[in-house]
């Protein structure tokens, strides 16, 4: 869809002005385009650090304002975000989670050592009821990650029955625990990272394990499960090939995990980074485009009808834990760099929806590239939150093809990326939305939107930018990164023209 001019900006020597003008040709008349699944904006919540406890759940007796134990401020922020799907309880945690420990009177629930994440002891006060009721509260589809690593087939089968059956002893137990009506549970992950923390299996062995667990995870009453096989990490194409070859006919989806991390031994600070590190991070994030394309090509070979969905059910930046925090809790700050990663990533995902049907950023609160950070009763919205909120106009909208020529950036690690990103969609009312990002730190770019036929009548928008790329929002101070109304776009005949400031993210609405 996009073409790079042959102008390579080597590392930081990006000071040429030649290409600071981009025309985006918007083909709003194109027919038969895919609808962007809302699930591309999915979230992930794990029993890890302060994601669940303190981040979402404080319990009904907390002095922090709550509704039935859920923090009011966080629930409101998540409702505003329009979270389409929420994955839980892990992550690595899921393969050591025994759901029966998390039901019944809270005072009777056993205590659990979280072996994966800092050996923190938790009281299981957030369990199946608390999770599924949260999903109902914020309007998200639940995505349950089942325990395959250390749990039995029977345990998973009974969990599905407990959540979704109308009759039988599991349904009766559920009713005794306060929930008469079954919940609707669509997405069921059969294991997580089964090549690693979820059982250390080979792809060949897991293919059979998958089929066994999937077989006994039944559809009860009117509930229809969408069964997700555990997929590859990053560039492990052989895993995808083996799973597709052995088990494609038994799965609805296959997952993939891709984290933006430079070096697992030296991840780098979330807030203190050089321009060179900024471009390295961004270029690594943008590599997901090629990684998706390669996994999709393998899936296409085994499933040309595209029946099996690809689900990127963990993605995002992974930096060093903030000083003073438990190293096992993965708490990191979130800057305008993360916002740029989010904007580029979402624009990429929206171009892959013929196969990619879901993406879940890791994680929703207080962990990795979070939407929300909390400290006691305080809450801040991160720059990543703002991008997700601004971009959610694309949820369930029809993809509109567009073309542009832009320049390229070569990171000092040798990765090549576009120096501009744009994606267009049309919603049910016929309104166009254009999400754009300019990653350059020093150069604004002049943009013209040119339409096939549309003669625009009105344009409005929002912008996210900050004084510096490592600006972030913190407790006890005014936000440094917050969206503002964008008034720079003007209609000129059949075009919309504007200047996209350096290091900014913009979403326009064109009528
Ligand atoms: O999101 C943190 C961890 O990253 C998850 O628990 C695991 O699935 C992945 O390795």
Image (spheres, helix red, strand yellow):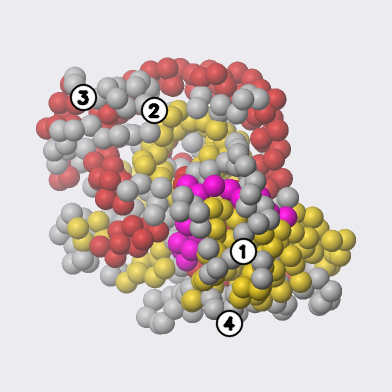
Ligand 1 contact, mark 3 (Cβ < 8 Å): no
Residue visible at 29% across and 22% down in the picture: 220
Percent coordinates x, y for residue 278 in the rendering: 67, 68
For discs 4 and 1, the disc positioned in front in the rendered view: 1
Which of disc 1 and disc 3 is earlier in sequence? 3
Disc 4 from disc 1: Cα separation? 35 Å
Point out the stretch of residues depicted in magenta: 384-403
Q: In the depicted view, which residue is nearer to us: 403 or 71?
A: 403
| Picture layout, residue 50 above or below residue 93 | below
Question: Can residue 476 be seen by looking at this rendering?
Answer: yes
Which of disc 1 and disc 2 is earlier in sequence? 2
Percent coordinates x, y for residue 367 in the rendering: 45, 57
Residue placed under numbered mark 4 in the picture = 467
Residue placed under numbered mark 1 in the picture = 455
Residue placed under numbered mark 2 in the picture = 225
Q: In the depicted view, which residue is nearer to us: 109 or 157?
A: 157
Neighbourhood count class around disc 4 (C-alpha, 10 Å): few under 14, some 14–19, many 20 upward: few
For discs 2 and 1, the disc positioned in front in the rendered view: 1
Residue visible at 54% across and 59% down in the picture: 433
Q: Quarter of the image holding residue 492?
A: bottom right
Ligand 1 contact, mark 4 (Cβ < 8 Å): no
Question: Can residue 13 be seen by looking at this rendering?
Answer: no
**SS label for mark 1:** loop
* Circles 3, 1 touching at the beta carbon (< 8 Å): no
Percent coordinates x, y for residue 179 in the rendering: 16, 36
For discs 3 and 1, the disc positioned in front in the rendered view: 1
């Amino acid at each position: 869809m996009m073409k790079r001019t042959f102008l390579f900006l080597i590392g930081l020597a990006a000071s040429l002005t030649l290409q600071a003008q981009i025309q985006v040709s918007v083909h709003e008349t194109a027919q038969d385009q895919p609808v962007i699944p809302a699930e591309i904006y999915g979230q992930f919540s794990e029993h890890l650090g302060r994601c669940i406890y303190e981040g979402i759940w404080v319990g009904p007796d907390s002095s922090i304002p709550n509704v039935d134990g859920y923090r009011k401020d966080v629930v409101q922020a998540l409702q505003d975000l329009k979270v389409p799907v929420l994955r839980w309880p892990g992550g690595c945690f899921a393969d050591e989670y025994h759901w029966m420990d998390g039901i019944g009177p809270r005072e009777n629930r056993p205590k659990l050592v979280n072996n994966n994440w800092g050996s923190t002891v938790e009281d299981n006060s957030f369990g199946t009821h608390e999770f599924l009721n949260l999903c109902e509260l914020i309007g998200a589809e639940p995505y349950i990650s089942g325990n395959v690593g250390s749990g039995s087939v029977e345990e998973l089968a009974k969990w599905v029955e407990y959540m979704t059956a109308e009759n039988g002893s599991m349904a009766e137990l559920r009713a005794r625990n306060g929930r008469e009506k079954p919940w609707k549970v669509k997405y069921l992950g059969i294991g997580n990272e089964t090549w690693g923390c979820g059982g250390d299996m080979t792809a060949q062995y897991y293919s059979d394990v998958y089929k066994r667990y999937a077989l006994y995870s039944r559809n009860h009453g009117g509930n229809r499960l969408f069964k997700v096989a555990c997929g590859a990490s990053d560039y492990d194409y052989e895993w995808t090939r083996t799973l597709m070859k052995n088990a494609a006919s038994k799965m609805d989806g296959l997952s993939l995990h891709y984290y933006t991390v430079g070096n697992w031994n030296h991840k780098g600070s979330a807030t203190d980074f050089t321009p060179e590190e900024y471009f390295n991070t961004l270029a690594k994030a943008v590599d997901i485009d090629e990684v998706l394309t390669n996994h999709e090509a393998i899936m296409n070979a085994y499933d040309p009808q595209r029946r099996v969905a690809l689900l990127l059910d963990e993605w995002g930046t992974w930096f060093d834990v903030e000083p003073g925090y438990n190293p096992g809790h993965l708490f990191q700050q979130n800057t305008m760099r993360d916002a740029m990663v989010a904007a580029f990533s979402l624009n990429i995902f929206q171009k892959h929806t013929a196969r990619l049907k879901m993406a879940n950023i890791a994680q929703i609160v207080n962990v990795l590239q979070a939407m929300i950070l909390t400290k006691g009763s305080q809450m801040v919205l991160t720059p990543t939150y703002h991008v997700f909120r601004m971009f959610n106009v694309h949820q369930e909208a029809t993809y509109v093809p567009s073309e542009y020529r832009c320049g390229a950036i070569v990171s000092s690690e040798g990765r090549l990326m576009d120096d501009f990103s744009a994606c267009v969609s049309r919603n049910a009312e016929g309104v166009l939305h254009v999400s754009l990002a300019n990653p350059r730190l020093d150069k604004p770019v002049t943009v013209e939107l040119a339409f096939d036929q549309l003669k625009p009548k009105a344009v409005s928008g929002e912008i996210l930018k900050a004084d510096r790329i490592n600006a972030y929002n913190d407790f006890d101070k005014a936000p440094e990164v917050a969206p503002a109304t964008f008034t720079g776009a003007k209609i000129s005949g059949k075009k919309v023209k504007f200047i996209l400031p350096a290091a900014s993210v913009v979403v326009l609405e064109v009528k």
